[in-house]
Amino acid sequence: MLNVIAMADWLTRISLSCFALSYLIALLLEISRLFYRVSVRSVVIFVMMLAGIFAHSIFLWDKFQADFSGGTPLASWYDWCLVISLALAVTYTIIALQRVRHSVGIFFLPVILGLILFAISIEGHQPFSAQERGNLWGMTHGISLLAGTVSMAIAFTTGLMYLVQASRLKRKLPPRAGFRLPSLEWLQVCNRRSLFLATGLIMIGLFSGIIMNVQFQNKLKNIVPWDDLVVISSSVLLLWLIGVSVFEMLYRPARQGRKIAYLTMASFLFLIMVLCFVIFGQHAETPVVAMLWSGGGE
């Protein structure tokens, strides 16, 4: 019994640095592919990712339990960044298992670590709202935007790999030892599916946010104005994503994949810009922003 209690206490002491260090070691091992060959490297990378995902999950679970007891989980951008980074870590691990000899971690792991560093930088940022959540549209809004951001990050990463692989093939560069990427066809399929999924999820998120804004228009004095910079930029982002998706479905020349990869990367940067408006702009200070971006309600 004492051993079980000690183990539970140890698990609650897992810090952010534990899983960040695991991901960093995995990245360094991925980079080492470029310089020397080690037969057990893929196994070690897989073990480090499993350890990181385990520590990451325990850290979030412990934090969510504390948030549940005191109010609402996922109540800050700090939480969002950590959830997105965990989703990307799981995605990368699954792809790495299927593509053992491919250097996909060089592209995925910097994004994962970048999200963790960004989360650290905004840890003390004002949380969304202390009001109780429970509105159906609010939950739909928050979950769909979160999943859409994950999908767009995956689309960005596979698009970047596509451009690197296409450039190498175009210049007829010989294969470099330790640096192999999936085929252009596989990358294009992943990029397309992730882009379509992200577009659909972000569309659901923005429309549910509009419905929530209308619902609370008569209940809150400081409702988010329709001409707010975030509202306008989010609408433009949605139109852009729809346009890119339609372009991808209808445009079929030989170099289609490269054009879509560039557009996907631009879409991801556009999404990051909108999120920065939300996090650091005046929009984040309005009372209703918690419900519009975290899935809350009265």
Image (spheres, grey):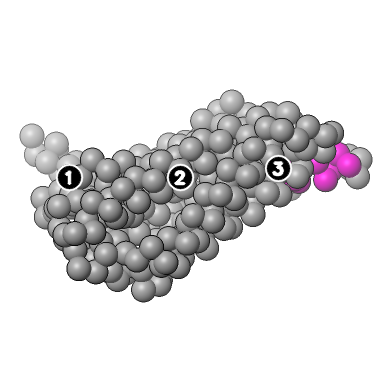
Secondary structure at badge 3 equals: helix
Which mark is on residue 73?
none
Taking 243 as reference, is 229 left or right? left
Q: Residue furthest top?
A: 98
Give the residue at mark 2: 202
* Residue at image point 55% right, 28% down: 97
Q: Position of residue 108 (x, y in %)?
A: 57, 46
Mark 3 is on which residue type?
Answer: Ile
Q: Please tell me which of labels 2 and 3 falls first in the chain.
A: 2
Taking 68 as reference, is 244 left or right? right
Magenta part of the chain: 160-170
Q: Please tell me which of labels 1 and 3 falls first in the chain.
A: 1
Q: CA distance from mark 1 to mark 3?
A: 38 Å
- Using the image as rendered, state which of residue 263 and residue 159 is in the foreground: 263
Give the residue at mark 1: 134
- Using the image as rendered, state which of residue 261 and residue 169 is in the foreground: 261
- Quick check: is 167 in the magenta stretch? yes
Give the residue at mark 3: 260
* Residue at image point 59% right, 50% down: 240
Is 179 rendered above or below residue 265?
Answer: above
Secondary structure at badge 1 equals: loop
